[in-house]
Every structure is written in structure tokens, then in C-alpha cells.
Amino acid sequence: MTTAPIGPMEECVAVETDEEREERNSATDVMKAMNRNALIEDLNRNFVAMAITKSHFNWKKKRPNINLCCLNLSFPQKRAKGQFLFFKVCEHLNLMEKDYFGLFYMDNHAQTCWLDPTKDIKRQIRNNNWQFVFNVKFYPPDPSLLTEDITRYLLCLQLREDVASGRLPCSFVTHALLGSYTLQAEFGDHEPDQPRTLGLGQLTFAPNQNKDMEEKILELHKSLRGMTPAQADAQFLENAKKLSMYGVDLHHAKDSEGVDIMLGVCANGLLVYKDRLRINRFAWPKILKISYKRNNFYIKIRPGETEQFESTVGFKLQNHRCAKRLWKVCVENHSFFSPTKARFLTLGSKFRYSGRTQAQTRTASSLIDRPAPNFQRTSSKRISRSLDGGNTHTHAEVAPMRVHGDNIYVRHSNLMLEDHDKTQDDVLKHQASISQLKRSFMEAPPPSPPQPNQWEKRLTSSPATTILEIEETVVVQEVSIAPKPGRVAVTAGPPAGPPAQQEALEQEVTVGQEVVAAEEAKAAKQESVSSESESEEEAEYHPNVSICHTKIPEEEEEEEEEQADKTAGAPPLVDEVSAAVEESAPADARDEKNTEGEHQAEKDGSGEPAHAAAPNGPRVPEGSASGAEQDQEPKVNGEARPVEAEHRPQVICCSEPPVVKTEMVTISDTFAAQKTEIATKEVPIVHTETKTITYEAAQLDGNGDSEPGVLMTAQTITSESLCTTTTTHITKTLKGGLSETRIEKRIVITGDCDIDHDQALAQAIKEAKEQHPDMSVTRVVVHKETELAEEED
Amino acid sequence: MAGLMSGFGHYTHAVVRGIPASLAKEALRSCQAEVDLAEARREHEEYVEVLGTRLGLEVVELPADESLPDCVFVEDAAVVCGDTALITRPGAESRRRETETMKSALKELNLNIVEMTDEKATLDGGDVLFTGREFFVGLSKRTNQRGAEILADAFKDYAVSTVPVLEGLHLKSFCSMGGPGLIVIGSSEPAQKALKIMQQMSDHRYDKLTVPDDLAANCIYMNLPNKGHVLLHPTAEQYPESAKVFEKLKDYMLIPVCNMQKVKVDGALTCCSVLINKKANI
């Protein structure tokens, strides 16, 4: 049957080429595709298409211009990013509160994947099946808090589909109730003289719809007289949101004993189901770490009131792709639904959630200032046609779409495969060295899954803690952006020309009384920075649970993304200067000169003992690294003033990743660092050079504690050729009567041209001194990473 | 129009059943105790009177069956939520036939009947705690995983979480709902542990009202027109310390109900009735 449904086509988002215009008429194909998709993984909520607008994207060969809904759009280049397409779709739908939505596609393994807005579309869609489905990605727990009716309407469409397909299970009565709101929203008041059945049988409300249900729906519909479509939608959502499986994204898994279970990811946390029963639940604040390794998925759980140790729970997924996908979904949901902007540290994967959090999107929504947009609830239009009696023979095919709305299908079949990126050889070579790096810096893999006994206990009998609904801020450790050849690039970068000498240089200046070394962490960071394998075998995610007292400006995130893009396209050069300024003062006599943030840190810290007790988990990589380093250092205890400390510099560490040449330079006076005596000689080696210069005062404190740090600020300044990211990390330690504040500043300069490192370093130290005149610089680390060009040079 | 999950505690009907003489000697019990049959019947009469006369529920009284000594504890035979009734498969073999009369009574009331036919499944209504937002099902000597699964299937709107019941007969032997979002819980260690599990498993927050005696934690909460919050709880005579705790509930109509005899055969307040809201909004 190739008869097109009449309604949706006029309002479709269609990007098409002339020669493939006929595809427009293949609505039934779309339906088939949808059904097929729905069958493939019925339980996966994200998967199923939300039918909103049908469209066929046909990217005309070698012509980056496409037609989107009669608008002439041109992809800026064929390397358009996911968000380009997503924004176009949202624009077409007139949707402003778009953060709850996303586009997904099917990968080669028939798995659904969310289109990453920050990455090239082309790089994500490895096959030629360019079909995208517009879908709710984060189900808002309280839809009444959405600002616009149009957003609620789109959410309704999704839920109608979820309910009708059985993905969102509900009882007979609820099916009927939801169905009646749907009728009211789309058809208006019940008309007594309407034919009694209203063609209801052709609308799908429930997977096992029957006459009884249809009658109940009609009966309830009558009682809704006078309700506006917007009110009916709102009521629909008020009821749907209470369903226990609302917004739960299910994944098949096995527990450590091989028993089939389901893991459900939702706004509140991770749910564990056996058959239909909920057998455990891990709220996000209880989860310290999420990781996967091969096909295993692990979560590290914060110890309960009565427990002493963190525990790790492991699940087996079908394969590593499933584990990775679950991991991603967890990271995204955790990030989105955490109370403030979450930034996180991921090891082994470049993936992170780049969008806004729910809190941010709500704030943004509250600023929406436009008259309520007009939009048409498509079915309402079609019912009149149906009542006119036209096209009855097509009902069978068309009917389901009435309830579903239309489909958005973005298809591109003739993808240009020309690749300006590195040759395959280059990539492989690079990957080899990377994976070696990765192996040596990856945190030790999580312990093997708990013994059956423990597992059983945890799973069914003693989830020990009461969940205190303490709103915890997830502050996450800054990870510098991956200068990854072949990563998403928008505009910058000379893709075709021979890459200039790739240079990545990191400089770190640590100023502090207490040594904070993060070399290994940095190395790990580098690793994550340069990780480019698309199929990482493992990755971790540490929600760094501590107090965020400085609102990280949102732009920063975006700029960083930008940076990522830039560095991706162009051979990167990373220059990092990190400075830690530390102060030693009695806890009760805080200096007024302290930054506001510090005060806040103290205040917040004392107000939330739970955080003080927060284990090192969130900072594991860095914390353990610095701890280890400190063990090797002579420990000097006492109350020496920072000034004295400066005269006793000490090199404490260096990073020695394999394949990375490391050069250490010791300088005997802190201030000398400002005088540009740091040699930054470059030694060309095959892939990466890492040069670390550590420079610091004697360590006064042998305490290896690594307190959960607090990310103070992070800002990125981008100029044409350079990108500077400054991250300020504050760590407060309370020892005896002394309160110690350590500020670590890390400046990463990335660029594709030469950097005057000395000047950058001097500038960093100068700034640190200016900003914290009462503190002393105790450590300077310059870390230069040079990524040399391959073969060509 | 009220929708899903509104009106927690609204009831119009109650199904109860008489006490057979066989209860005194043959009813199952976890510890040996002499039951005064006449006294037990008097207690039960008072209980039914509270439901019918005092609270104005329409009471459906089923006749006692001498071959079913435990038949007065109707709660175990059916779980009613909204207009769906799940006829259970009680864990105790001797009680299986109790469901027959219950089923026909509920059918009469026009409820949608769901039956538990799986022979591997067992479920006692006493193990089912409905909070208004979700179900907790105690996995006990009487209720197994399969029974809980069937319950989850019958009430698809709600999350169904399992809670191990390590001591006591049923989940509701040490807890019950004392209001919307309020769980009355005993203070014994197993009771507190079960509460923690329920809190961990839930997406919702519950307040708790801890009473010194586990058995006193079994109460009946209703929200009735013109009466507001109503709580049937054990008397001060039976549990003096716990009764003091109930006194703290403000804006409640507190009705102490004597349960001295039935408790000897593990019968608590909720056990003796199945409450139904027939004027369900939908």
C-alpha cells in the first residue's frame, strides 16, 4: 500500500532531493520501519519513534543544500553536527523547550543510539541508514512545570505512543482515562449525534484494545465536555506521570548469578527489576561511580549509615555495546536530573553529557517570552476528514498514525564518503599508542562482581540506608577536552592540508603549601583527552559529590564544546598551567581576603556533614594519584609559614606514561618560575611528548588526604588560534585547629600555533598572586604535551 | 475529575465474614493460645459495627464456613485496588477455598476480577501494603515471588516492590498505612529494617509513625466524607504505650477497636475486612 496519508504530508519536515521526491509518498514504509523498529527492542523506551512529523532527509550527493520543509537550508558543510539537525527539527516544530528531546538512530547492530549533538552526524551514522527519530529523551517528572503547551503536547504525543505500544504499561482504567483525554484534546467535545463509534476502533490507545475499552473511553470522553485541548493534555500528563514506568528506560541485564533482570534508568536513579517486580533501587545521590568494562556494568554505592565501605554492584549486559549504551544513558540522566550543572570526569571515554540540566532548562524556559505558539493537534484535523467519509479504504494503514501523530524520519541514503580526515593508517597508529596509554592509566578496574552472598543480600534483603533526600550538588572534575584527531569539527581546522606539527603542551603551576600533585590524574586526563577509539571497552563516570558554590557559567560549557571542536579539526596544542594557592590559617580566623567561594565552601561544608564524610570516591583518580605521590615525599610537619616553604622546593612527581617522553626540570626557587627559566625544549618523538616540570615548596603536610575538591570556576577564552581554559579547584582541609585551603588553578592552553609558554606561565603566577595575595605559591608544574604530526613531518 | 491515584483511603464498601466455631481450635496460629470464641465473636461484631454504623460503609457480610477456620480474615483472600480485585492464592493450603465466596461477593460488586491461577504462586493479602502510590509485597512464609509478579500484572499502574519478611507472619503484621504518605511501623528491628527497604525502594517519601508494639502498627486508615481522616487502631488496654502514640495524631477521628482474641490467631485489624471504593471516579 503506497497511498499516503493525506494529512501529515503537508506539514512534514522534509528534506529531499528532486530525484527522490517520490519517497515522500512512502508513508507506509515509514510506518513499517517504525513497526519493525518497535519490534526489535520493544522494551526500550528511548527506542520507539515518537511520531511527530514525517520527513525524509535526502542529502543530495555532493550538494550540501537540502530542503527542509520547503525552506532552503544549507548544511554549512557535510560535517554538520547532530545539533544542527536537531535544532532544525525543533525549529520546525516550533519547540523551544528542546532539552527534553533528542533524535535517535539505529546503529549497525540494530541498537538505538541518541544522536550526539556535539558530534558530526556522519561520524555517528556509520551505515547508510539515515533515519532519525525525534523522541523524548528526558521525561520531565512534573510536566506541569513545562512552560509551553506545545512542549506538553509533544510530550503527550510521545506518551500516547508509549502507552499504545505497551512500553508504558497501565491498567484498563488508566488506558481508558488517558484515551478519553486524548479524544478531548484532539477531537474536542463529544458530539452526541456523532456516530457512536467515531471510528475509535482505528485509533490505537492500548496494546490490547477492545470494545469494552473503547466504550469506556467514549463514556469518559463525554464527561470532559468543555475542557480545552491544553487542559486535556495537562490532565493526560498528570495521570501519565504517576505511572510507575513513566520515564523509565529499560535495559536487559543479568545479575552476578546470571539471573535475568532489567535495569531501569530514570530521573531518580537506577531501578532493578526482576520480571515486573522492583527488587532494588539506587538513587543517583547514592551512586558514587558508574563504569563499564567490556560487557560489565558497575555502580559504586555510597556506604549506608550502618555500613563502613563503599560497595560495587555489577551487572552483565549482553555485550559491550549494551554496557556502553547503558553507561551513557546513566551519565546523561544523572547529569540532566542533578540539581545543578554537573560536570564530570570520565575516564576511558570522551563521552559526556553536553546539554543543559533540568534546572537550567527550567530557568531558560522561564525566560521564554513569546506568545503561545499556534500549533495544530493533527488528529483534530483528520477526524473531520474521516467523518466526511473519505478514504475509508486506507484506514487500516493510516489509522494508527492518527493517534501517533506523524513520524519524523530523517533519511539520507547517498552519503558522501569522501573523508578529509586522517588516513586509516594514521588513525590506527594513533589508536595503538593511545590504548597503551589508556591501559596504564586507567584506574584499576572495579573489583570483580560481589560474591553471590553479598549480592543476594544487597539485592533483596538489606539495602541498608534510608535515602535522605539531601540535594547534593554534583561537582565534577574538570577534564580537559580531547584534542582528538577526527573528532567533531565544525569549522576550524584544515582537514585537507597536511597537518601542521601537532603540538600539545600542558603547563601546570601549582601554588600551595600542601602539595597537590595530579600528574597521574593528568596523565589519565591526557589519556581521556586523546582517546579516540569509538568502541572504548570501558569507561567510568564519577559524579564528584561536593558543594558547588560557584555557578559555573553556562557559556563555559558551550565554549568548551567549541574548543573541542576547534581542537578536533586542527592539530591541537595544549598548554596547561595550573596553579594552586594555599593558605594556612586557624579555622576560626578566616581571612577576609579569602575569596567568597572559600567562605561559602566552609559554610556549605559545615552545613552538610554528609559531604565532609564523602569518601574519596569521586576524586578517585586524582586523589589516589596524589596520595601515592605524597607517600614518596619527605614529609615535613609543622607550622612553617608558606613563605619559608617557598625556599624549599621539591620535585615530587612526574608522569611517565609509556610512549610518552617525560622530561623533568627542577627549579630551585618558586619565583624563578616567573622568570621564565623553565625550559620547554621540544623533543620530537613519534606521537606524543609529555613534559612535566614540577616546581614547588617543601611539603608541610604529610597528610595524604585528598579531600573532595571543589571546582570553583572554569572559564574558557577562545581566540583565533588559542584556547585557554582556566579551572580553579579549591580544596579545604581541616586538621586540628587549622583550616587549610588549597587552590589549584589549572590553565590549559590549546592551540595550533606556537605559544609563548614562559609568558603564559609568568602570567598565570602573576594572576594567582594578585588574586590571592595572602596565599603563597608553593608548586608550579608545567606540563607540555606535544602531539607531533604523523608521517608527513 | 479526579484521576489516577487520587482519593487514598476513600471507601464505600467493606466485605467481612463471620467467625466459625472452628476458629477457636483449628485456626492457624504462630503461638499456642486459647481463644475465647464468644469473646472473639463479640469483638468482631463490634468491628463490623464500627465499619457499618459508625463509619457508614456498606458492609457485605459473608457467612462463616466451619470448614474454613480462618475465613474471618478476609483480607488474605483478595486485594482490591480501584475497581480491580485480585483473588489471591493463599499461602496456607487450608485456606485456599476461602477465595471462592470472596470471588463471588466481589463479582456482585461489579469489580474486575483477576484470578491467580498459577499453581506456583502464593499470595496473602496480609503481605500487600498499598500506599496510595505503589505496592509493597512482603515475601513471607505465605507469599512468594510469583504471587507478587501476578499482583504486579494485575495492577500495572503501580510500582510493585518486594520486601523480605523475616519475622512475623505478614508484612502488615508490623506496619500499615496511617494516612496518605504515612506509614505506621513497629519498633522491632525487623520492622525497622523492612521500613528502610521500603524507603529505599520508593521514589516517594513517606513519613513514619513508630509505635512500640509491632502488632499495634496494624491499623485501618480511611478518608471519609464528613469525617476526614479516620484511624482504627488497637485499644489502650491492649497496647497502652502504642495507644499514646496514636493520640498524637491531630485532626484524626481515632477509633480504638478491641482485638484481643483474634490476635491470638494472628488476626490484626486489617485482616478482618476488604475495603472497596465503589464510587470510584472512573
Image: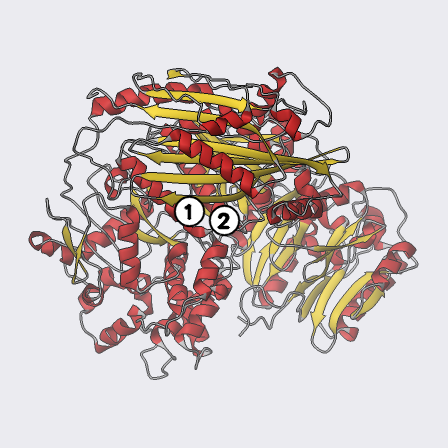
From the viewer's perspective, tell me whether residue A86 is left or right of residue A604.
Answer: left
Q: Where's residue A40, x and y in %?
A: 32, 42
**Residue A583 pos. (x, y %):** 65, 36
Any part of residue A772 in sight = yes
Residue appearing at x 35%, y 51% in the figure: A102
The three-letter amino acid code for the residue at tag 1 is Glu
Relative depth, front residue between A266 and A711: A711
State how the image is colored.
secondary structure
Q: Are callouts 2 and 1 both on one chain? A: yes
**Residue type pointed to by label 2:** Ile
Total residue callouts? 2
Using the numbered discs, state the Cα–Cα distance from disc 2 to disc 1 in whole angstroms: 8 Å
Which residue is at a point 88% across and 51% down the rendered structure image? B35
Relative horizontal placement of residue A140, taking residue A310 as reference (left or right): left
- In percent of width and height, residue A153 lies at 38, 66
Quarter of image, res B223: bottom right
Residue nearest the observer in this picture, A761 or A78: A761
Q: Read off the residue under disc 2.
A: A552
Under circle 1, the secondary element is helix
Q: Measured from the top left, where is residue A602 in percent x and y?
A: 67, 45
Q: In terms of secondary structure, where does tag 2 sit?
A: loop
Say which residue label 1 marks: A557
Structural crowding at the residue carrying mark 2, measured as other residues with C-alpha within 10 Å and reported as few (<14), some (14–19) or many (≥20): some
State which chain disc 1 sits on: A
Query: Is A631 displayed left or right of A135 in the figure?
Result: right
What chain is tagged by disc 2? A
Which numbered disc covers residue B87? Answer: none
Upstream in sequence: badge 2 or badge 1: 2
Q: Are marks 2 and 1 in contact (CB under 8 Å)?
A: yes
